[in-house]
Image: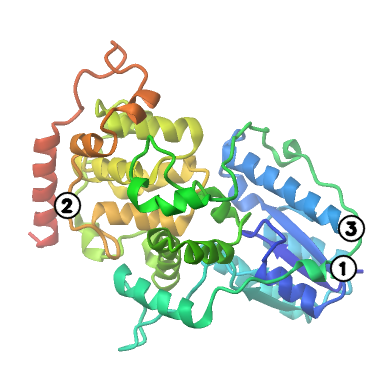
């Protein structure tokens, strides 16, 4: 019987897995497990594409374990109840549970409960850092030992520590003989209450060509200028450490900074958990949002009459993905031109994005709304028309997604006047923030 468990969460790979490495180093019989969390799944529609994506990742992970003569044991339920009612009884020789850290409030609360249950039964719980390079208190200001809330000095110190300590990989392959040699059968996706969806996913690797031209073309949505690795980073099917090593070797400074932004937002979420429900800057919660439901519906459906905004929303609805430059444009349009609460947009993205990550999604939306850490100032309002002229000059991206432009089914003009709505937004923000 296995005397240690490794619990996969946001790390659906064997290669360079920090927690799995520690488990296989300390114990001779390690059983890997995964839990389809019913607390999360029960809120999702049965055709949710992300569940299908995760299930495919789990199948791939299990195949990798089978090659090593082992298998992944998969549960479905409330993780706290799974440990209490199943794991403890099924593994009577269990001495320790290993996993990798998750910094979201729900995850931290869940882990505290499970750690307490395990402690009552004399079982240790150990979580390693894996999904980020630096986390929690790794990068703090030298002056007052407080977390950074501005990215540029954070990134400077992030790089200094990287140069000093490195992003070393964990060689798991030479310890795979310590896996428990037990065969388990995966439940099918239908037994979880979901249907299989055909979701095309990007490659797990980023080419040197993209890294070498990343700064030049990353903002052009019609070009293949981004890594498209966000969904793999979200579910940990690739190693952040190896990706950082590649960026360093290629001298891809801008790409490296994008990886650092992930760390930055994760440490913001850790230190300032109030951002989940409220503005990082509390005064921004005083903004009197218009929250016009007809406008919001038009935005969600990609029928605002603003082609670049509609293209982005249709890409999101059809594929579960949206180019990062376009994410900023549609977020600015919703919060500034339509004066709709950033939380509405954040929630819609959370429903649709395959790469949904609470820290990054929240950080991005609050940046656009002006309410977040290191955010765009409230008077910075993207003009979606000039953004389209600059980053989609030939209209290639727009034509790909807004196929009915110029037809009777497409709005003849934008739902709001771009110039007037910008002026109104600045006035509303200014008045609310001045306390008037």
Which mark is drawn over residue 177?
1
> Do residues under tags 1 and 3 come within 8 Å of each other at their CB atoms?
no
Mark 1 packing: few (<14 Cα in 10 Å), some, or many (20+)?
some
Q: Secondary structure at mark 1?
A: helix
Label 2 vs 3, first from the N-terminus: 3
Q: Nearer the viewer, residue 29 or 273?
A: 29
Q: Residue beneath label 3, please?
A: 69
Q: Residues within 10 Å of mark 3 (few under 14, many from 20)?
A: some
Give the left or right position of residue 256, taking residue 418 as reference.
right
Task: Answer with left or right where residue 2 lies relative to residue 163.
Answer: right
Give 410 or 157, whichever is nearer the viewer.
157
Residue at (72, 70) in percent of width and height: 171
| 64 over 112 or under it: above or below | above
Q: Is residue 230 visible?
A: yes
Query: Separation of disc 2 and disc 3 at Cα?
Result: 57 Å
Label 1 to label 3, Cα distance in Å? Answer: 8 Å
Q: Which residue has dot 2 on it?
A: 380
Q: CB of mark 2 within 8 Å of CB of mark 3? A: no
């Amino acid at each position: 019987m296995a005397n240690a468990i490794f619990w996969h969460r946001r790390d659906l790979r064997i290669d360079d897995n920090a927690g799995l490495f520690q488990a296989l180093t300390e114990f001779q019989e390690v059983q890997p497990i995964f839990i389809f969390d019913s607390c999360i799944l029960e809120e999702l529609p049965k055709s949710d594409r992300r569940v299908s994506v995760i299930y495919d990742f789990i199948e791939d992970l299990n195949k990798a374990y089978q090659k090593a003569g082992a298998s992944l044991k998969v549960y479905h339920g409330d993780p706290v109840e799974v440990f209490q009612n199943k794991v403890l009884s099924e593994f009577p020789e269990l001495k320790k549970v290993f996993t990798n850290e998750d910094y979201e409030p729900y995850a931290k609360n869940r882990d505290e409960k499970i750690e307490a249950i395990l402690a009552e039964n004399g079982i240790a719980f150990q979580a390693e850092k894996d999904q980020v390079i630096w986390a929690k208190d790794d990068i703090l200001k030298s002056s007052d030992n407080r977390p950074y809330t501005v990215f540029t000095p954070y990134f400077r110190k992030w790089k200094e520590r990287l140069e000093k300590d490195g992003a070393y990989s964990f060689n798991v392959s030479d310890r795979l003989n310590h896996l428990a040699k037990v065969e388990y059968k995966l439940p099918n996706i239908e037994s979880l209450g979901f249907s299989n969806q055909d979701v095309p996913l990007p490659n797990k690797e980023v080419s040197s060509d993209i890294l070498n031209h990343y700064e030049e073309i990353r903002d052009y949505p019609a070009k293949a200028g981004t890594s498209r690795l966000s969904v793999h980073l979200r579910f940990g099917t690739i190693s952040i450490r190896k990706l950082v090593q590649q960026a360093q070797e290629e001298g891809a400074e801008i790409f490296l900074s994008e990886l650092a932004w992930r760390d930055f937002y994760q440490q913001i979420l850790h230190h300032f958990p109030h951002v989940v429900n409220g503005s990082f800057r509390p005064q921004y919660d005083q903004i009197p949002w218009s929250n016009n439901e007809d406008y919001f519906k038009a935005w969600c459906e990609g029928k605002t009459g603003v082609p670049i905004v509609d293209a982005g929303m249709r890409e999101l609805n059809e594929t579960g993905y949206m180019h990062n430059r376009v994410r900023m444009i549609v977020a600015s349009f919703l919060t500034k031109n339509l004066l709709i609460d950033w939380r509405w947009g954040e929630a819609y993205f959370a429903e649709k994005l395959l790469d949904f990550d609470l820290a990054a999604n929240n950080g991005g939306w609050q940046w656009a709304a002006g309410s977040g850490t290191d955010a765009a100032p409230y008077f910075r309002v993207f003009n979606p028309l000039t953004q389209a002229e600059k980053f989609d000059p030939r209209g290639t991206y727009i034509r790909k997604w807004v196929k009915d432009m110029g037809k009777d089914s497409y709005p003849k003009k934008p739902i709001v006047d771009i110039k007037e709505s910008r002026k109104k937004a600045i006035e509303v923000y200014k008045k609310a923030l001045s306390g008037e």
